[in-house]
């Protein structure tokens, strides 16, 4: 796929996700943060279905949605995306900036909206801050998205299983936040939409503005751009001489 097509696709996905996120945000703000749609029903189901084994598993999964693990995935994404040492260093830096900036922006939005979490009596894990959009869901979706994009761009062997596992992990982190009672389902949906919008925008910027020399897999350098043309001209002159 050409860079222009990648930029167009990323821009369209980003615009769609931001539009949906904006609509959901307005609904949340308009209802003063009270549960929306099936929020209360899904949370009640989660509270009523919490065997010890499932809770322990959910806590383990939800712990991977913050801290070092998402950044480790971002570094891995950069390493996969690059072909040379220079490209990998740049890709790692871009992935880390995308993840960190997305987290910072999400935190600002969360503070601005200030949606209350579900009642503490429903919690089965630690949580802090406001509810919308879910921080764990956003961070996990960003990290998973970066890795999925890198894998799809370079296409290593075993791409499909890796994409499914990574995407499943990113979605599972968000779902555990509802299951453990610290977020409404719409908080998690908001986090996924936010992450999709931010990832799409970052990919659009990279595809549109990053110099081709940073992403090209060709072995030619900028110091000998006329070499091939000179060889072709020489060949044509040789063929044109009379025998």
Image (cartoon, rainbow, N blue to C red):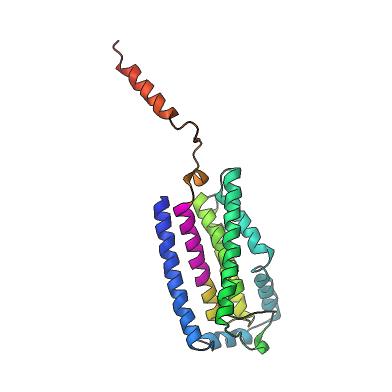
Q: Residue furthest top?
A: 243
In the displayed structure image, the side of residue 90 where residue 124 appears, left or right: right
In the displayed structure image, the side of residue 30 where residue 97 appears, left or right: right
Residue 37 in sight in this render: no
In the displayed structure image, the side of residue 48 where residue 215 appears, left or right: left
| Quarter location, residue 59 | bottom right
Looking at the picture, does residue 214 appear above or below residue 196? Answer: above
Q: Does the magenta segment cover residue 195? A: yes
Name the dominant secondary structure of the magenta segment. helix
In the rendering, at what x and y percent does residue 11 appear?
42, 62
| Quarter location, residue 67 | bottom right
Residue in the foreground of this view, choosing between 70 and 41: 70
Residue in the foreground of this view, choosing between 80 and 8: 8
State the count of labels.
Answer: 0
Residue at point 57%, 84% (across, down):
115
Residue at point 64%, 89% (across, down):
119
Q: Does the magenta segment cover residue 153? A: no
Residue 90 in sight in this render: yes
Residue in the foreground of this view, choosing between 189 and 225: 225
Q: Which residues are magenta?
A: 193-209
Residue at point 44%, 28% (across, down):
227
Residue at point 55%, 59% (across, down):
146
- Quadrant placement of the C terminus: top left
Q: Residue furthest left?
A: 242
In the rendering, at what x and y percent does residue 178 appear?
60, 80
| Quarter location, residue 129 | bottom right
In the rendering, at what x and y percent does residue 81 appear?
55, 51
In the rendering, at what x and y percent does residue 239 appear?
32, 18
């Amino acid at each position: 796929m050409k860079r222009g097509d990648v930029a167009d696709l990323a821009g369209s996905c980003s615009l769609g996700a931001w539009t949906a996120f904006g609509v959901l945000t307005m609904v949340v703000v308009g209802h003063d943060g009270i549960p929306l749609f099936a929020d209360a029903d899904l949370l009640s189901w989660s509270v009523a279905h919490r065997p010890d084994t499932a809770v322990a598993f959910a806590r383990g999964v939800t712990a991977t949605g913050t801290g070092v693990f998402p950044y480790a995935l971002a570094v891995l994404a950069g390493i996969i995306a690059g072909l040379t040492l220079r490209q990998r260093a740049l890709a790692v830096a871009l992935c880390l900036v995308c993840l960190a900036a997305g987290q910072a922006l999400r935190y600002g939005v969360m503070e601005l909206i200030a949606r209350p979490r579900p009642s503490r009596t429903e919690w089965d894990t630690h949580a802090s801050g406001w509810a919308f959009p879910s921080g764990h869901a956003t961070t996990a979706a960003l990290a998973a998205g970066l890795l999925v994009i890198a894998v799809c761009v370079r296409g290593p062997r075993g791409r499909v299983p890796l994409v499914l596992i990574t995407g499943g992990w990113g979605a599972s982190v968000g779902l555990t936040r509802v299951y453990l009672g610290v977020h409404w389902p719409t908080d998690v949906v908001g986090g996924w939409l936010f992450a999709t919008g931010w990832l799409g925008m970052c990919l659009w910027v990279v595809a549109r503005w990053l110099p081709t020399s940073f992403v090209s897999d060709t072995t030619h350098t900028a110091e000998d751009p006329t070499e091939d043309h000179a060889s072709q001209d020489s060949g044509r002159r040789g063929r044109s001489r009379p025998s």
